[in-house]
Each structure stands twice: as structure tokens, then as C-alpha cells.
Image (cartoon, rainbow, N blue to C red):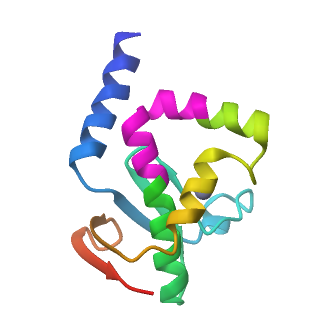
Amino acid sequence: MYAVASLNFGLSTYMLNGMPIVVEQDIAEMSYGLIHAGGFSAGPFICIDSTDRPEIWHLVLRHEYQHYMQTAVLTPVGCGIAYSFEQLVHGYENNWFEIEAYNAQFDDFVLDIFYWNSKEVLHVEWEW
Ligand SMILES: [Zn+2]
């Protein structure tokens, strides 16, 4: 129990102060065809589906960064519970967490990320 609490609040502390760890990969291939998504976030990690379209890459990064911050503020366990509750009651389309992320994905942004593929910090700036 203490281990779970330590991990939960430890991750939250890292996420509020550190930068997202971004992994770019073919998500369908990685998940043996189970997941077809532009991206997803899990704790401090953001996974972006490989794409050669920069506008899609930046849109997915901004959408998933919103989920990253939701998780950082509510902690991974708290956000997991709240997200699941929203999903049950309102479904994906009207899930508050998704509405907020979709509303943010066309924002201009400046963000430092740790880009896992090349193991370096990248300064990302995007304007629509
Ligand atoms: Zn989302």
C-alpha cells in the first residue's frame, strides 16, 4: 500500500516538475494490432504513433500533453479513477478529460520534452 502511494505521488511530483518522456512508435505494431490510436499517455510517458505528417504529430503531442497534466494534477491513481468514472457515465465523446484534451489540441505551444527515440531533450514550438 505504501509502495503504491509512494509511486503514485512520486510520479505526480515528477510530472509536475519534469518533462514528458515522449516515445514515437508504430502503435498498432507495438500492440500486436490491439490498439489503433494516434497516441496515448501513461504516467510520465506519451506515446505518439509514427507519422510523417508534422501537423498530426504536434496535434497528438498537445492532446496527450493535456492528459499528462490531468494525470500530474490528479495523480495517476486519482486520474485513473476519475477518467474511468467519466467514461462509464458519459462515454468517450462526452468524457470531460477528452473534451478538455480535444479543446487543447489546436493550441499553439512551447514545450520541452525528453524524446526517447534519440534520448535527448527537444524544445518543441508549434503554431497553427
Ligand atoms: Zn484523449
**Residue 60, position in %: x, y?**
53, 70
Residue 10 located left or right of residue 84: left
Q: Quadrant of ligand 1?
A: bottom right
Q: x and y percent of residue 90 in the render?
A: 77, 41
| Front-most of residues 47 and 83 | 83
| Quadrant where the C terminus is found in the figure | bottom left
Answer with left or right where residue 87 lies relative to residue 65.
Answer: right
Q: Is residue 91 above or below residue 57?
A: above
Query: Residue 89: which quarter of the image?
Result: top right
Dominant SS type (magenta): helix
| Residue positioned 49% across, 28% down in the render | 78
**Residue bounds of the magenta highlight:** 67-82
Residue 23: x, y in percent? 42, 64
Q: Is residue 78 above or below residue 49?
A: above
How many dots with numbers?
A: 0
Report the residue at 22% width, 50% height from top.
Answer: 18
- Name the side, left or right, on which 13 lies relative to 106: left
Residue 58: say if magenta: no
Query: Where does residue 84 sit, x and y in percent of width and height?
Result: 66, 34
Front residue (pair 94, 9): 94
